[in-house]
Structure formats: structure tokens, C-alpha cells
Amino acid sequence: MARPFRKLLRLLGLDYVKSPIDHWQRIAGMLDHFGITLVLDVGANTGQYVGYLRAAGWTGRVVSFEPVTGVHDVLAGNAAADPAWEVAPAMALGSADGAAEITLSNESDMSSLLALRDEILAVSPSTAAGGTERVNVRALDSLFDDYAGADDRVFLKIDTQGFERAVLDGARISLPRIAGLQVELSLIPLYEGEALWRELVDRLEAAGFDLRFVLPGYYDRHLHRMLQIDGIFFREFGASS
């Protein structure tokens, strides 16, 4: 991360906890251990997640999903030189096919289909809305077979700024065909109506997934607490929901 951006975060009271490369090597090792052949990168932004996986040595196939037009263009450019990295048409994933207004944050990785809560805006004004955009929304169930073959072992990464519950709601049919997930988990409410960490962990455990690894996310120096973490979940070999 560029030094001026780090300074800006500190002025705003935020610390970005960059996961050491060994964290990503562990995730890459889990992908290999569970025989993952396809990562569905939902909420890709400009492709940072795939960059971490590639730096850790994972070379498997990835399909990235990003709804915001300008960000999607940058994502497509970043993926262009990687033959194993496909970028789907611009879309959000949700509970059903349709369209919705996404609120564009001044920090592009904070744009969301849910409204940011006022108390978060108060301590992090740089995340304020910078307009809206009408975006296509698809349920994962309606496009899963477009990208995943019958023999693929699929890992689903969801980083959708509070919209994780809706993505899972749209994956009820395809979830039994998914071997593992990485899900952004909020420890306190950041967006109106989002599911917090305990609901999502309980839901995934009930579906047969075990929480195997946790990555730190944003720590807020005004609130003196971690705001988000990422949970990595896998089924045991041969298990199904």
C-alpha cells in the first residue's frame, strides 16, 4: 500500500492490517489441500484478492465479479495478462436476479448495496457516499453452471460490504457444490441491515463448513477495536450439506 494512503488512514484513525504473505501462503496451501480448482471472487474490486493468491503461489482458475463500471474496467485490465483469471460481466451477486442501486463510496472498496451506518461515517468520513450507480444483480444459483464444471472443486470468496447474507441466500442450490468459502465478517454493524459474524458463522457451520482460519481486517483507532475479519471455511473431504 502506498505510503501517502497509509498516512491518510492514520489521520482518519484507521489502521490497515496487511496480512503477512505467510497468511496467504496458508490460504494457498488450504486451496491445494482441498483440491480447489476454481475460485469465485465475489466483490473483486480491482483484483487485490487474486494478486495476494498469485503472490502466494496459487495458480488455479479464478472468476472475478465486480458491479461498479469504472472499477470493473480496472479489474479487467489487471486480469488481462493472466490466462487463468476470468472477469465476469459487471454485476453484483445477491439473493435473486434483478437490478439495484449501489452506493459508491469515496473509497471504492467500501461501495455497497447497503447504506453505511452514521456512526461509522462519523469516525471514517472518507467512506462517505460519492453517488450511486444502477447495477445488475444475479443470484449465484442462476450462473454457477456457467463457470463451474461438474468436476470443479469450488471455493467461494465473498467480500461484498455487508451484502454477504444476500449472496448466500442466492446460493442455496449451489452451496452443496462448494468446498470452501472466505467470507468477510463484521464484528459490529457497519452497514444497515447486514448480518454480523456470529450469524454467518452459525449459518455456514450448519451447512457443513468448519471455520479453519481467520484473517484480520480493519482496526479502528477511534473505536479501539477490530471492525472486520475474514473467515475461511472448508468442508471435510466428502462432506455435504
Image: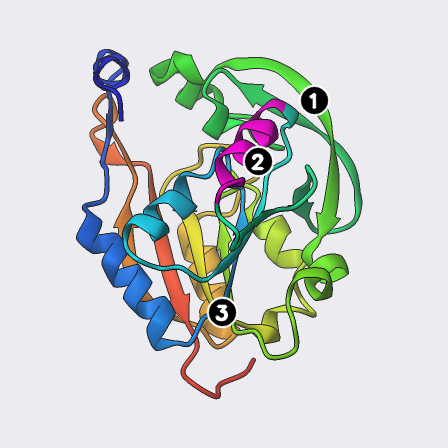
| Mark identifier at residue 37 | 3
Q: Secondary structure at mark 1?
A: strand
The answer to whether 85 appears left or right of 32 in the picture is right
Query: Which amino acid lies under the numbered mark 2 shown in the image of this protein?
Result: Ala
Give the mark toward the camera: 3 or 1.
Answer: 3
**Is 99 displayed left or right of 41 in the figure?**
right
- Image position, residue 8 (x, y; %): 27, 12
Chain-order first, disc 2 or disc 1: 2
Task: Give the amino acid type for the residue marked by disc 1 in the picture.
Answer: Glu
Which residue in the protein does label 2 denote? 76
Instruction: Identify residue for label 1.
Output: 133
User: Mark 2: few, some, or many residues within 10 Å (few <14, many ≥20)?
Assistant: many
Q: Nearer the viewer, residue 82 or 179?
A: 82
Seen in the picture, residue 127 relative to 185 is either above or below; the reply is above
Q: Main secondary structure of the magenta part?
A: helix
At horizontal 40% and vertical 45% (from top left) the residue drawn is 49
Report, in whole angstroms, how far the alpha carbon at label 2 lies from the one at label 1.
19 Å
Circles 3 and 2, Cβ within 8 Å, touching? The answer is no
Q: Position of residue 103 (x, y in %)?
A: 61, 23
Q: Would residue 211 be seen by someone viewing this image from the given angle?
A: no
Q: Please state the extent of the stretch shown in magenta in the rendering.
A: 70-81
Could you tell me which quadrant the N terminus lies in?
top left
Q: Inspect the magenta stretch and tell me whether residue 88 lies in it.
A: no
Task: Please give the count of numbered marks on the rendered protein.
Answer: 3
Answer left or right for 195 relative to 201.
right
Disc 3 versus disc 2: distance between alpha carbons? 21 Å
Q: Quadrant of residue 9?
A: top left
For marks 3 and 2, the one nearer the N-term is 3
